[in-house]
Every structure is written in C-alpha cells, then in structure tokens.
Image (cartoon, coloured by chain):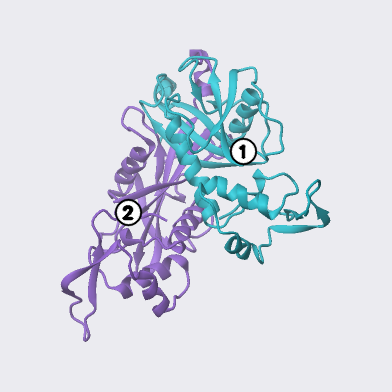
Chain colours: A purple, B cyan
Amino acid sequence: MSNPQPSDRRQLFPLVSADIALFSIERERLRVLLVKRANEPERGRWALPGGLLRPDLDASLEDTARRILREKTQLSVPYLAQVATYSGPDRDPRGWSVDVLFYALLPLDQVPAVAGSKTEAVSWRDAHRPGTALAFDHSQHVAAALAKLRAKVERHALPLHLLPPQFTLTGLQKTVEAIVGRELEKSSFRRRLKGEDSLEEVTGGFERGVHRPAQLYRAAKGFVFEG
Amino acid sequence: MSNPQPSDRRQLFPLVSADIALFSIERERLRVLLVKRANEPERGRWALPGGLLRPDLDASLEDTARRILREKTQLSVPYLAQVATYSGPDRDPRGWSVDVLFYALLPLDQVPAVAGSKTEAVSWRDAHRPGTALAFDHSQHVAAALAKLRAKVERHALPLHLLPPQFTLTGLQKTVEAIVGRELEKSSFRRRLKGEDSLEEVTGGFERGVHRPAQLYRAAKGFVFEG
C-alpha cells in the first residue's frame, strides 16, 4: 500500500495501547491486579493497568507493557506474554483504538504492589471474580487472560513464575489448583511431574519450621513457561 | 493517560497493519498463499497479503484482514483468527509499526486465488518450506502461523475448515497429516474421532467413482475450530 499522506495521519493512525493482567498468588488464591484510574477517560474506575504506546520510549509493545507496569505499580515482572489484540472504533471514547492485552506472572514472595505516580490506588482481586463494572472492556480482558493462563496449565505447563525461588510440590499443586479453579488428585498430579525436566530438587533443601519438612524444588535452568 | 496533543499525533500514532497467512490443502499438502508486492516498500518481493488499517472502512482489525484478502486475492474465508502482534521501530522502513498477524483457512474445493487489483501475482507455496527472503519479517510470520495451526491440531482440534463440505475420514486424516508434517497411525486416529461431536455422518452419503466408496462426513452444526 502506498505511503499515507500527512493529511491522512489522524485517520490512519489510531490510538495504540497496552493493558496488563498481572496475576499472583495470595493466600492460595489466584489474584489479578487492578488500578483505580487517576485520569480521564473512565477516571475513578477500576481497570487493568494500561496506557498508550510511546514510540519515542518503547522498542516494542512488550516494552510498553513493562514501562506502564513500572509507572503505575512500581513492579517489574519476569514473565510477560500476549493474550490477544482488541480493536475497533467503540472500545475507547477517544476514538479508533488498538489495544494489546498481555498477561504477566509475579512470584508470590514479592512485595505487594504500591500505587505509582499515575494511579490512585491498587487492589489485588480474586482473578476468578474480579468484580463487574471495570473500565472499558476490562472485565472481558481479565476473563481472556485467565483462560489463556488456565489453558496453558491444563496443557501441563508448570506456572513456576508464580512460585518463590524454592517451593514444595504441595505448594506447586496448590498454585495449579488456584489457576484451574478446582482441586486435583495428589497421586495423579505427582505422576504428571515425573520426568518433568523443568523442575529440579534443591540438594539438601527442606522446608523449615514444620514437623515433617518436605523436599524443596526450584525451576531448572533455562525453564520456559510453554504449553 | 491524558489525551495526546494534536502536535504529537505523528509520534503517538504508529503505522497499524494486518497480515494474513492463508492456508489451504492442495495435492495433500498444506499450502500458504504469497503475493508479489506491487508497491513500495519491498516492491516485487513475495510476502503474505497485508496492508494498513483503514479506520474509516474497518470495524476491527479482523475486518482489515478480510478486506485486504478481498482486495489482494479476491478471496473470502470462513475462518480467521489472530496469531500474534508484532511491533517496533525497525520492522517497516516507514517507521514504528504495529502489525497483527492472522491466519485463515480456505477449503480445498475453492477456486485458487487470482491476483487482485493491488497485487502483481499470487503463489501457493509449501507451508513447511515457503522459501526464504520473503519481504519484512514474513518468513517468521509463516512459521509462527504454522506453529499455531499445528499446535491446535495436535491438541485434537479438527481442521474441518480446510475440507470440502463432505469428506471421508481418510481425507480428514490426510489433512491432519499435511498440517503436522508426519504420517499418523490409522487405528489410533480413528479411535480419537470416536465420540467427536464436531463430526457427523452424511446419511446415505458415499464417495463416488471409486471401487469401495467410503462413508462421507461433514462438520456438525455449530462446529467451532477450538483447541
């Protein structure tokens, strides 16, 4: 297609933004982070952290997502991946918009998020029931991101990015249960882990402060969250 | 984030485009459609059909993809879905760009594509070996789209959108084999189809012109290509 003329730029260049569904585990439940919007549109409503692409600052939309998370929540995340891209003239009151939704995983031993300079407040919500009446199309965004995470875990990907650096197999099972939303049978879960090369035993590492301490495990080098 | 000022528009609004990896089956092989670019940039090189979003014409980027396919190949497709979104300052010589890659499936009984008004020529290539030196990052695009289609079929989704309205189980198996790139064992493939509710027998429908005609099947009502 030929190069657009300058007079067409407003029309040919829609708003481009990134939103992030950041998941973590707290008290054995899967949580998603919401922020209270400090600016229009939808000021004062709860939403996923999100914001506009800055071509002068960002080398990719993944960069945009990481920058926004830092600005709005002061958090850095090890794992971030695309869920889907939403687009159309009616999603955002400012006009035709393209919004790339990411999901990210935060280990449960990290400090809870605090509000950044561009956010009034943050809140960790139950990811399976984040509340209705979120800003924009963010209720559907949470559902889509959760479905993606859940499908990956159902296909046997281990969500090790949600765990602390060392964890027990029981802790791993509870994390998987928190994502899929149901209890799993212990013996079949353990069978599934046999020969799993993304897990390795911590030599001589055991839980502390419990009567019968369990073996500790960690993610093997080069672990990737695939599935 | 606050409303961008008009003077910032050029910077805040990158190029937004859609590309389509259109797959079909021809002579029992999975093919992907390439077009020879009629315009700069990359004029004369082979590429996936793609083009810029037109907010004045398109209700979504899915719409953009379908419009571009019509313009460049005169084809309409029943199935179209997102693969991923690519972004950054260096993918396109025209500047910071956001490109949403879709894949689409065309039934093998459809007429082959002819060049549209915006394309010099079209070519159906072996999807597993589309050739090197495609325009932009389109060699990686083909690989990513194929990986998505293949993963879906490996997870037992039936690629019925690639088949004619009525087909035999042998035809179905050959289509799956063309996608995954290896032969499958017939009896285990047939076992997998047992209780598959997306398939239904055509009552009294059999192949024609062969010695021992096989039962014909079709996609059940409400079939969705999920997995």
Q: Is residue B40 above or below residue A197?
A: above
At a point 33% along the width and 46% down the height, the residue shown is A69
Q: Which residue is mark 1?
A: B24
Along the viewing direction, whichever of A60 and A71 lies nearer the viewer:
A60
Q: In whole angstroms, how far apart are the C-alphas of marks 1 and 2?
A: 32 Å
Task: Residue type at mark 2: give it.
Answer: Val
Q: Quadrant of the N terminus of chain A?
A: top right
Along the viewing direction, whichever of B184 and A89 lies nearer the viewer:
B184
Q: Which residue is mark 2?
A: A224
On residue A63, the disc is none
Q: Quadrant of the C terminus of chain A?
A: bottom left
Local packing at callout 2 (Cα closer than 10 Å; few below 14, some 14-19, many 20+) is: some
Along the viewing direction, whichever of B50 and B185 lies nearer the viewer:
B185
Q: Residue furthest right?
A: B204
Q: Is residue B15 above or below residue B200?
A: above
Task: Give the x, y percent position of residue A116.
Answer: 30, 47
Task: Give the x, y percent position of residue B131.
Answer: 46, 29
Q: Chain of mark 2?
A: A
- A120 displayed left or right of A136: left
Q: Chain of mark 1?
A: B
- A77 displayed left or right of B198: left
Mark 1 secondary-structure assignment: strand
Task: Residue type at mark 1: give it.
Answer: Ser
